[in-house]
Image: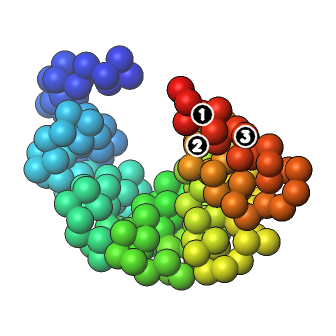
Amino acid sequence: YNRQVYDSAIYFYRLAIQKDPENADLYLDLGNAFLNANKTDSAMIEYDRALAIEPKTEGAIHGKGIIYYNRKQYSRAIESGEIAVGINPDCNDARLLIGDSFYNSSQLDSAMRWYEEAYSKGYRSAGLSHVMAYIYDNKGNTQRAIPLYQEAISYDTTRTEIYQRLGEIVAGEEGNQYRQKAAQYQKR
């Protein structure tokens, strides 16, 4: 599994399940292998098997949420994410799943609530900082957007669109630096 040889992982998880058929974690792992092999129907079956043994298997609930999200069934993805957070209040992956589902449903205020929760619980990434900055920016709150844009490029310095936007909303010499950086990346 860790080597991303999912067909082999599936085979060995099935062997393990034959020896321990009441182990919810094995079904979860098998479901994850199927999910990573883009066999989502099989993944869903294995997640359901894990949940039949242990209804609070957070990973299986979250895995189902990812499948729903990828199928653009955002309300079901949100529901799965909320259940996962209910089981494990520290599950920022589920918060991001919920936020992304609301975002893709054009419910930006609801998305921001979940993004801010993940952020306040210590989750940091270029993607999260960028999407939060974008939402604040679109709501006209550049005061909050600017530091988040800056944080996003501190994680990933190749995001030309962030340099461009900072060049537009930051005044003076600092804004010039962002415009120059954007122009530099556009030449590549």
Q: Residues at badges 2 and 1 in contact (C-beta under 8 Å)?
A: yes
Which mark identifies residue 180? 3
Q: Is residue 149 visible?
A: yes
Residue 172, position as x, y percentages in the image: 88, 57
The part of the image, by quadrant, that contains residue 115 is bottom right
Q: Nearer the viewer, residue 64 or 140?
A: 140
Q: CA distance from mark 3 to mark 1?
A: 9 Å
Q: Is residue 103 left or right of residue 180?
A: left
Disc 2 marks a residue whose amino acid type is: Thr
Residue ID at (53%, 26%): 188
Disc 1 residue crowd, few under 14, some 14–19, many 20+, Cα 10 Å: some
Which mark identifies residue 160? 2
The residue where tag 1 is placed is: 185
Residue ID at (49%, 60%): 96
Q: CA distance from mark 2 to mark 3?
A: 11 Å
Residue 146, position as x, y percentages in the image: 75, 62
